Image (cartoon, coloured by chain):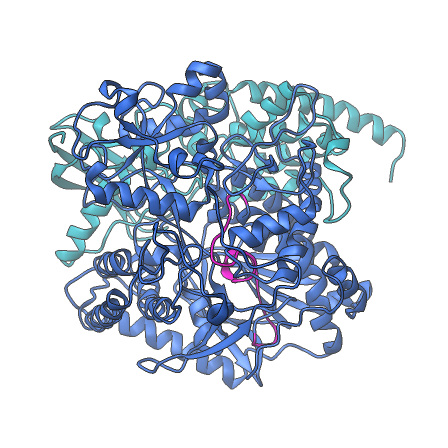
Chain colours: A cyan, B blue
């Protein structure tokens, strides 16, 4: 069995949304390299509880990198140093004995801190509600094989649809922009034949809603680096293309005096 | 009270059609007069809420997550079954029905399962139209793969993220209804009590997890889609927050809990690596399509896998079950893995796994094909174990994964408490004693999209122009007081140990005595151990922080308290069922070569348990299972 390592964790503690917070240092002398990052937090919390101190709040659920609940900044990197890996799938064999890790919540104007490492990401839901769907009431669908989708198109749509909605892209962005999240959902649907009927309205609506909450994209590309699903910023380029085209379409429709 | 399953009369294939015709309808203009509460936003809950919204009902949907898309359906990997027969390989509704009944070891209702197979084809149509990016052939049409317990390829999939994509489809359909104002989303809120008034479900009591506020919601009907209870074992493949609280609260209010002993142990999970282990990770069953399972023939063989020659390997599933080979159903695969490890043939540092080896298929098909099929799973395995499964065989071991048991429901998915409907994994209805792979997603969406939208109408129609019970009613105030008291009790126990500590203890007891193999003495021991843990929990649990703020320790403690009560019912049911069937394997009841021995004479029934208060034995109600269309047969995968 590999030997345990000794870590120092500097963790952000904040009792509530509008309350002041500060870093608190925790010494963890016995971290097994087989542990996941969240299991280290579990161990710290068990000890805090035993000492009569309130445990650290953090969001987590599936611990398989798919639900998108977890996510913290580790040494300034969203989800930590390993590429394409959510915090829950980050294992301690990636760290060295004696390391100090700074652990913070997502920091973005659109994501207020609820407590400690837990933040409110509900603006992402508002973007989906604005148009991140195909309008197809239950029961009204044609036979599935009536809609052939070329394999490369289906594969690219799937690449975009793999987004887990964790918000790391927003946290990593110096502007707190949500372009990667929005473009992933938008292009999942805009690329597919099923998504064509609402393509332009969807684009205008989702981008508009995004801009209500989030900063602007200035092509830093940090989002792509942080994304645990390695979603490409090419989707942002496709979003920009669709947005320009959607505005042209919208002008034409206005000219036709549609209701 | 006698259990009326309300199965329609007539030939099997016509039952659902006839039933839909005979049910009362609510006219479109009247639907907005009805309010429905949906608890849970997984496949079943989200699809039901979306469809209710589309139909015009007024819906409130609650989830303890920050967003509906986090529900644990998201983690389902392998796929969803449907009797499309796109592969022209002999599939049909009847065959999917038969495979499901057989896979469930003849402990499921024929009528429900047939309906499930019928609507399975509509599910695929619906999901494709929503934009679910299922795997495609080069011609653009849908691709399929095969799964355990079937000899046809009927599983649709989206890489190893089928659950995610199906859930996003349902979530997005629901998001549209939220934007339209038909569905109100109440997130980060947990249901802590069911309110029953005059024998009907009148609403629920919830706790806002951010502010700690306890409040009530009332409606004409309550729909629970709150998932399963596999986390009762502490270590399971379920998400950390999956729990049995909603279902257990309903049980305490009079809903019957059916077949709790049918708990599925999934054969392909990553083995534990230490005492800090917080959960277990599933490796999709689809891996068994190509991977070959083996152990070293000689117990205690410490050589690396690559150094063990073919002649000294034991491909025990292929040898014992030549017809199905590595694709035997989950219960069979799990028990056989346990046998090998118990016999000292386990692999890995802790000797707690068996190999799932891809050397053969990589040699035959090339690494690229395998990467395309299972790339993300291989990557996940590598992250967790630090080993590269392209070159070193995976190590796997069974883990608690799914609950076939759940709240008892009739053919309309209504529990014995009128107005309380239960969908998806939270009910008991379709999988009998063992669920086949890729059937959970099918059932969740069948219930939510295509069954409950019809059957709830028949319940609501006679209540036209009646208001829901007011939340000022004494029934609600009493329920709220009960919730507040429980919260207070947990905070004021001021003991020494965390809720997790007790949960782990409970898990160990259940895994040892009520896991893959059970016997009467073990179950009796477990029952007394659980009682002792429960008593200690209430005396010695330490929950820090306040009740009126975001307090994850408090959430956890409440769920563990309910698990500690529920676990007793689980063991009671397992002890009552003196037979082996599906996932329920009683060591006293096995054939000479170690296969399960069913007792159809005495146990072909659904065991529905009625809670009689803490410390009292629950009452057993039996629903006899009648098989008119299939013959009892001993399951054989040899």
Q: Is residue B412 above or below residue B176?
A: below
**Residue A123 placement, left or right of B505:** right
Q: Main secondary structure of the magenta part?
A: loop
Q: Is residue A117 above or below residue A223?
A: below
- The residue lying at 34 percent from left, 61 percent from top is B586
Residue B73, position as x, y percentages in the image: 50, 47
Instruction: Tell me which corner region of the image, top left, top right, bottom left or bottom right, holds residue A169.
Output: top left
- The residue lying at 63 percent from left, 38 percent from top is A132
Return the residue nearer the eye: B241 or B340.
B340
Q: Is residue B170 above or below residue B432?
A: above
Count of picture labels: 0
Residue B137, position as x, y percentages in the image: 65, 23
Magenta residues span B416-438
Residue B548, position as x, y percentages in the image: 35, 65
Return the residue nearer the eye: A84 or B293.
B293
**Residue B207 placement, left or right of B556:** right
Instruction: Tell me which corner region of the image, top left, top right, bottom left or bottom right, holds residue A11.
Output: top left
- The residue lying at 15 percent from left, 59 percent from top is A52
In the orientation shown, which residue stands out farthest toward the front? B592
Q: Is residue B386 above or below residue B635?
A: above
């Amino acid at each position: 069995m590999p030997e345990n390592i000794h870590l120092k964790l500097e963790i952000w503690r904040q009792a509530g949304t509008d309350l002041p917070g500060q870093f608190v240092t925790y010494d963890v002398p016995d971290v097994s390299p087989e542990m996941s990052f969240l299991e280290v937090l579990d161990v710290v919390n068990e000890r805090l509880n035993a000492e009569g101190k309130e445990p650290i709040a953090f969001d987590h659920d599936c611990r398989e990198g798919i639900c998108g609940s977890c996510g913290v900044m580790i040494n300034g990197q969203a989800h930590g140093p390993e590429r394409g890996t959510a915090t829950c799938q980050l294992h301690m064999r990636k760290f060295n004995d004696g390391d100090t890790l700074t652990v913070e919540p997502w920091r973005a104007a659109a994501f207020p801190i609820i407590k400690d490492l837990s933040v409110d990401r509900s603006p992402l839901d508002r973007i989906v509600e604005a148009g991140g769907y195909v309008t197809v009431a239950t029961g009204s669908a044609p036979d599935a094989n009536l809609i052939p989708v070329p394999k490369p198109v289906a594969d690219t749509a799937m690449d975009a649809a793999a987004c887990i909605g964790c918000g790391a892209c927003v946290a990593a962005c110096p502007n707190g922009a949500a372009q990667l999240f929005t473009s992933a959902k938008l292009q999942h649907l805009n690329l597919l034949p099923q998504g064509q009927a609402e393509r332009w309205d969807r684009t205008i609506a989702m981008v508009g809603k995004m801009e209500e909450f989030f900063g602007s994209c200035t092509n830093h590309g940090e989002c792509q680096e942080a994304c645990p699903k390695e979603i490409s910023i090419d989707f942002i380029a496709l979003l920009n293309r669709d947005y320009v085209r959607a505005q042209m379409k919208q002008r034409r429709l206005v000219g036709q005096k549609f209701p | 009270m006698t259990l009326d399953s309300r199965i329609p009369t007539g030939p099997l294939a016509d039952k659902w059609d006839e039933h839909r015709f005979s049910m009362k309808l609510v006219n479109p203009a009247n639907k907005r007069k009805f309010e429905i509460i949906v608890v849970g936003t997984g496949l079943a809950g989200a699809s039901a809420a979306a469809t209710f919204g589309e139909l015009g009902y007024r819906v409130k949907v609650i989830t303890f997550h920050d967003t509906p898309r986090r529900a644990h359906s998201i983690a389902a990997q392998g796929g969803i079954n449907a009797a499309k027969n796109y592969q022209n390989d002999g599939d049909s509704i009847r065959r999917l029905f038969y495979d499901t009944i057989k896979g469930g070891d003849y402990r499921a209702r024929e009528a429900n399962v047939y309906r499930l197979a019928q609507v399975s084809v509509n599910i695929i149509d619906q999901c494709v139209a929503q934009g679910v990016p299922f795997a495609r052939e080069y011609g653009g049409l849908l691709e399929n793969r095969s799964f355990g317990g079937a000899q046809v390829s009927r599983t649709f999939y989206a890489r190893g993220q089928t659950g995610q994509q199906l859930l996003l489809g349902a979530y997005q359909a629901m998001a549209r209804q939220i934007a339209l104002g038909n569905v109100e989303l109440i997130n980060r809120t947990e249901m802590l009590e069911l309110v029953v008034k005059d024998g009907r479900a009148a609403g629920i009591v919830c706790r806002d997890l951010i502010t700690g506020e306890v409040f009530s919601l009332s409606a004409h009907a309550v729909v629970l889609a709150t998932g399963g209870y596999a986390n009762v074992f502490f270590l399971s493949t379920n998400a950390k927050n999956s729990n049995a609280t909603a279902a257990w609260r309903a049980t305490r209010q009079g809903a019957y809990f059916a077949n709790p002993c049918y708990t599925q142990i999934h054969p392909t999970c990553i083995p534990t690596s230490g005492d800090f282990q917080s959960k277990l990770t599933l490796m999709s069953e689809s891996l068994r399509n190509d991977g070959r399972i083996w152990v070293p023939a000689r117990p205690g063989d410490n050589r690396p896998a690559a150094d063990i020659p073919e002649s000294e390997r034991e491909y025990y599933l292929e040898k014992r079950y030549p017809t199905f080979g590595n694709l035997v159903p989950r219960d069979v695969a799990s028990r056989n893995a346990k046998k090998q490890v118990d016999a000292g043939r386990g692999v890995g540092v802790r000797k707690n796994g068996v190999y799932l080896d891809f050397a053969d298929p990589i040699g035959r098909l090339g690494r690229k094909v395998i990467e395309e099929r299972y790339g993300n799973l291989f990557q996940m395995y590598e992250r967790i174990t630090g080993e590269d499964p392209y070159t070193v065989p995976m190590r796997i071991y069974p883990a608690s994964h799914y609950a076939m048991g759940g709240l008892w429901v009739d053919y309309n998915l209504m529990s014995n408490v009128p107005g309380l409907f239960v969908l998806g994994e939270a009910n008991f209805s379709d999988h009998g004693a063992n669920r086949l792979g890729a059937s959970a997603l099918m059932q969740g969406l069948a219930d939510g999209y295509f069954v409950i939208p019809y059957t709830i109408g028949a319940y609501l129609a006679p209540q036209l122009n009646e208001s829901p019970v007011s939340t000022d009613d004494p029934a609600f105030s009493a329920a709220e007081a009960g919730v507040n008291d429980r919260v207070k009790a947990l905070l004021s126990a001021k003991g020494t140990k965390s809720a997790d500590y007790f949960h782990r203890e409970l898990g160990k007891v259940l895994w040892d005595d009520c896991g893959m193999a059970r016997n009467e003495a073990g179950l009796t021991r477990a029952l007394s151990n659980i009682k002792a843990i429960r008593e200690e929990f209430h005396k010695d649990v330490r929950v820090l922080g306040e009740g009126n703020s975001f307090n994850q320790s408090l959430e956890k403690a409440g769920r563990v308290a309910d698990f500690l009560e529920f676990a007793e019912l689980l063991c009671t049911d397992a002890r009552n069922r003196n037979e082996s069937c599906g996932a329920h394997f009683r060591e006293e009841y096995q054939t000479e070569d170690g296969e399960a021995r069913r007792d159809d004479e005495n146990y072909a029934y659904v065991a529905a348990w009625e809670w009689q208060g803490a410390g009292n034995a629950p009452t057993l109600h039996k629903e006899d299972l009648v098989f008119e269309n299939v013959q009892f047969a001993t399951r054989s995968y040899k």
